[in-house]
Image (tube, coloured by chain):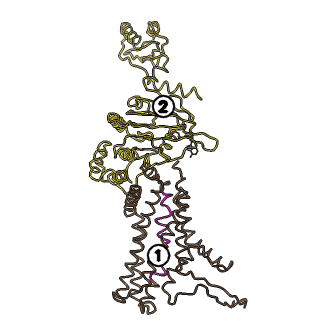
């Protein structure tokens, strides 16, 4: 049926328009612009040879590293309160008075948040590419940048999906934002360290582990899946053998797709049952 | 065109052991306005929210034009205008933009949309504010926009929960005019309200619920004659104090009891219809007590409401 999809797109468009008007969008775009400008200025002033000697290291440092944080930031800003805010601000009653399935509301809001997030990371990319063109000319775009950008979109899909799941768990924006922020900016790192260092298994079930591919793709050769490192404790003089894991690209994509599918299915299921009491 | 209909079928909502709504049955059909009455907490909003799939029934179902709301809210609500819980509109939108969004999602053709939006904004007297941001609007102004949003696609069925909430007296009168206009255009309106004068003015039928149960559902005319038991009252005012006159009024034929409201006003209870009332007026004038006004006391619906609601407590 074409009509329900049409309504999803109509809703997504109006929600995106709402984002464009909102103060939070202006602040986010402003923040990204400031980051971009500072990077530009620092590069121009200090001209660090380690970075501007080679396009791959330039884009690896400028995109592969920071993009993970930018995407988490976007998910917190645009995803965390998307559903919870509808309850808290009572705007949900307006949407619910319209002939929209709950799934259409969820999908429309997701698409709008996705578009707003992409707008944000695209702005960052523009700053980066302008600098790249300045230092290396218009023909020095390593394929890794394109690959990492594509992987970033999949990562965004997964992270936003998770943010929406938590957003449907709460009816208060503050809680939803707090939980998503703490989980993504701190929680997953702690879990990952715990799993790799103490349990000593591959953290194949953690989205933060999968996000490694965004940066790893810039390395040649691509890092091996497992690396055994021998560590000598300087105080205890104990020698430890530690295994470091690196997700393969396929593995990273699979984890991200898994997160997207599972969190979206769960989020939809929750929202379908949610009452506007 | 088929007759618009709302069918409430054995509708029940339980919160734990408490039943906010208890097996409610109602069948509303045709062009009319049905007033939905009941004290605070009676279950009106609960009913209307289930009728629009905002909350889910524990038992039973609601059909809008034959379409199950729970089964397909998209199709069931497409013929329906809804105003429940005074929603907030996205603050950065203007009334025009908010209405455009509502009309767009309701598949109002782009060619008609602008005219419809201008029309409903004029109807709720918000044309001057059409391009201002909703965020700074007062409560009543927002309610007017919400009402406009419910009307923008010219729906066959209107489900309104206390539409006059937050409106000034003129706004309330405007709502009445809008509802009268809708009835003329073959629309079915199901409206909860605490303002009995409003219900008396615009509703053809009333349903009264209390503690989640239906007390009665009938035409306004039937309700008034059925429950008043032939007992009526009129208020009479006099230009000068009438202490001595009270007993003479009480002695008039048909008068049951006389109550002094203050030194110049009496409430005269009598039994019988308009014929008796007419004779009492004639006799009262004949008594030459400086009578200046004579009118039905209170609202018959109010008396019935109070009687029925207190009976159950
Ligand atoms: N989410 C909820 N959880 C528990 N009880 C609820 C919930 N929502 C409503 N109720 C109860 O259901 C009953 C009916 O409430 P409802 O809002 O339908 O009343 P109402 O007739 O609309 O009253 P009012 O005239 O005050 O608007 C009330 O006793 C209320 O406390
Ligand atoms: Mg209510």
Q: Residues within 10 Å of mark 1 (few under 14, many from 20)?
A: many
Residue A179 versus residue B56 in the image, above or below: below
User: Which chain did the renderer colour brown?
Assistant: A
Circle 2 sits in a helix, a strand or a loop, which is it?
A: strand
- From this view, report whether residue B265 is shown above or below residue B179: above
Q: Which residues are magenta?
A: A62-85
**Residue linked to disc 1:** A152
- Foreground residue among A116 and B140: A116
A66 part of magenta stretch: yes
Helix, strand or loop at mark 1: helix
Say which chain tag 2 marks: B
- Residue nearer the viewer, B245 or B65: B65
Q: From the top left corner, tell me how far across and down residue B252 is, in percent.
A: 44, 7
Question: Which chain is represented by yellow in the image?
Answer: B
Along the line of sight, the residue nearer the viewer: A154 or A39 = A154
Q: Please, which chain is the residue tagged with disc 1 on?
A: A
Q: Position of residue A130 (x, y in %)?
A: 35, 82
Co-location on one chain, circles 1 and 2: no
Q: Position of residue B115 (x, y in %)?
A: 26, 48
Q: Is residue A69 left or right of residue A188?
A: left
Cα distance in 3D space between marks 1 and 2: 58 Å
Residue bearing mark 2: B207
Question: Which picture quadrant has residue A145?
Answer: bottom left
**Prevailing secondary structure of the magenta residues:** helix
- Asked if the residue at tag 2 contacts the one at tag 1, i.e. Cβ–Cβ closer than 8 Å, the answer is no
Q: Quadrant of residue A35?
A: bottom left
Residue located at (49% from left, 11% from top): B256
């Amino acid at each position: 049926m074409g009509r329900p999809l049409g309504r999803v797109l109509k809703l997504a468009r109006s929600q995106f328009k709402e984002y464009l008007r909102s103060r939070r969008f202006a602040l986010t775009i402003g923040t990204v612009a400031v980051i971009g400008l500072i990077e530009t200025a620092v590069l121009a002033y200090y001209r660090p040879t380690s970075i501007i000697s080679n396009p791959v290291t330039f884009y690896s440092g400028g995109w592969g590293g920071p993009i993970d944080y930018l995407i988490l930031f976007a998910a917190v800003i645009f995803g965390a309160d998307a559903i919870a805010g509808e309850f808290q601000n009572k705007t949900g009653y307006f949407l619910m008075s319209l002939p929209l399935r709950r799934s259409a509301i969820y999908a429309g809001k997701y698409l709008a948040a996705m578009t707003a997030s992409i707008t944000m990371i695209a702005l960052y990319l523009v700053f980066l590419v302008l600098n790249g063109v300045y230092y290396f000319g218009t023909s020095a775009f390593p394929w890794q940048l394109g690959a990492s950008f594509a992987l970033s979109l999949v990562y965004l899909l997964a992270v936003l999906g998770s943010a929406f799941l938590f957003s449907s768990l709460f009816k208060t924006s503050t809680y939803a934002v707090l939980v998503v922020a703490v989980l993504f900016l701190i929680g997953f790192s702690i879990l990952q360290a715990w799993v790799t260092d103490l349990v000593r298994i591959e953290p194949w079930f953690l989205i933060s582990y999968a996000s490694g591919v965004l940066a790893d793709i810039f390395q040649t050769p691509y890092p091996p899946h497992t690396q055994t490192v021998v560590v000598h404790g300087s105080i205890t003089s104990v020698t430890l053998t530690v295994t470091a894991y690196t997700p393969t690209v396929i593995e990273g994509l699979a984890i991200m797709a898994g997160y997207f599918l599972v969190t979206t299915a769960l989020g939809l299921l929750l929202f379908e049952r949610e009452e506007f009491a | 065109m088929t007759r618009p209909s709302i069918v409430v079928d054995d509708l029940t909502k339980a919160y734990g052991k408490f039943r906010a709504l208890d097996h409610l049955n109602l069948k509303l059909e045709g062009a009319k306005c049905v007033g939905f009455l009941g004290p605070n907490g009676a279950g009106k909003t609960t009913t209307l929210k289930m009728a629009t799939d905002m909350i889910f029934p524990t038992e039973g179902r609601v059909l809008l034009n034959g379409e199950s709301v729970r089964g397909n809210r998209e199709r069931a609500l497409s013929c329906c205008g809804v105003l429940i819980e005074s929603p907030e509109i996205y603050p950065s939108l203007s009334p025009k933009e908010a209405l455009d969004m509502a009309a767009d999602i309701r598949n109002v053709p782009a060619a008609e949309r602008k005219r419809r939006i201008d029309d409903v904004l004029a109807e709720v007297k918000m044309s001057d504010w059409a391009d201002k941001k909703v965020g700074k609007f007062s409560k009543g102004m927002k309610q007017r926009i919400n009402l406009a949003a419910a009307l923008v696609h010219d729906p066959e069925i209107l489900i309104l929960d206390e539409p006059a909430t937050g409106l000034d007296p003129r706004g309330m009168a405007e709502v009445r005019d809008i509802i009268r206009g809708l009835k003329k255009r073959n629309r079915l309106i199901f409206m909860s309200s605490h303002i009995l004068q409003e219900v008396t003015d615009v509703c053809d039928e009333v349903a009264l619920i209390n503690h989640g149960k239906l007390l009665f559902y009938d035409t306004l005319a039937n309700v008034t004659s059925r429950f008043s038991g032939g007992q009526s009252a009129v208020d009479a005012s006099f230009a000068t104090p009438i202490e001595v006159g009270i007993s003479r009024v009480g002695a008039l034929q048909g008068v049951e009891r006389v109550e002094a409201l203050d030194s110049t006003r009496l409430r005269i209870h009598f039994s019988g219809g308009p014929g008796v009332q007419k004779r009492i007026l004639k006799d009262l004038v004949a008594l030459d007590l400086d009578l200046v006004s004579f009118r039905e006391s209170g609202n018959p619906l109010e008396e019935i409401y109070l009687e029925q609601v207190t009976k159950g407590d």
